[in-house]
Image (spheres, rainbow, N blue to C red):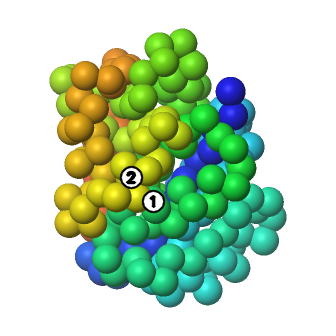
Amino acid sequence: MKIAAIILSAGSSRRMGKPKALLKIREKTFLQHIIDTVESAGITNNIVVLGCEPNEIQKTLSSFTGNIIINEEWERGQLSSIIAGVNVVNEIDCKGILIWPVDHPLISQTLIQKLLESFRETNKKIVSPIYKGRRGHPIIISAELFTEIKNASLNVGLREVVRAHRNDISEVPTEEEGILINIDTPADYQKYVDHYFSE
């Protein structure tokens, strides 16, 4: 069952003061770390969606063999970037997409593999990790919902689709708090990334 990954890295990173995609986990950027994680989990159809100031980020992706697309409408919100990715996925003939925002890098290959396994085995349209009762990122969305994604309100975003299918969600329990951690500010980076990778 072919799955594609859409890695979202189009926002302005205004509160961080620099592109989040270029922040480092040890020797790798957030973006490269996520790419390596999805590839290690067996996903080979990978799409990176850029938007605000893409040139500097693109320079770090010289070895990336997937699709790099520029969402010229990135200011319209995250859903616009998801739709840009879905438009590319439609040409790949995948059964679903893993959607992974670049500011949620603290997630393991093992968890990605568990999400993929749940998607294949449960036939649910949505697969989400859950930590202490709270859903987080990344999630898998069935190709059956692509039209709904494209028609969803940009103001509400992907939540609109998830809410409409609340009875068709497979929740995958995890002890990885990283599914909830958004690295949005320098303080977040210092608190979480330095904590997770201090050894």
Residue depicted at 50% across the width and 76% down the height:
71
Q: Position of residue 8 (x, y in %)?
A: 48, 61
Judged from the image, the secondary structure of the residue bearing numbered disc 1 is: helix
Give the amino acid type for the residue marked by disc 1 in the picture: Ile
* Tags 2 and 1 touching, CB below 8 Å: yes
Residue depicted at 45% across the width and 72% down the height:
10
- Left or right: 83 as drawn, with respect to 27: left
What is the C-alpha distance between the residues marked 2 and 1? 8 Å
Give the amino acid type for the residue marked by disc 2 in the picture: Ile
Nearer to us of marks 2 and 1 is 2
| Mark 2 lies on residue | 149
Residue 82 - label: 1
What is the tally of numbered marks visible in this picture? 2
Classed neighbour count for the residue bearing mark 1: other residues with Cα under 10 Å, few (<14), some (14–19), many (≥20): many
Q: Position of residue 126 (x, y in %)?
A: 39, 31
Judging depth in this view, the residue of 63 and 71 nearest the camera is 71
Above or below, comparing residue 18 to residue 137 in the picture: below
In the rendered image, is residue 41 in sight? yes
Q: Position of residue 29 (x, y in %)?
A: 58, 62
In the picture, residue 42 is in which quadrant?
top right
Residue depicted at 23% across the width and 29% down the height:
166
Judged from the image, the secondary structure of the residue bearing numbered disc 2 is: helix
Most extreme residue toward the top is 121
Q: Position of residue 190 (x, y in %)?
A: 33, 59
In the picture, residue 155 is in which quadrant?
bottom left
Above or below, comparing residue 184 to residue 130 in the picture: below
In the rendered image, is residue 114 in sight? no
- Lower sequence index among marks 2 and 1: 1
Quadrant in which the N terminus appears: top right
In the picture, residue 109 is in which quadrant?
top right
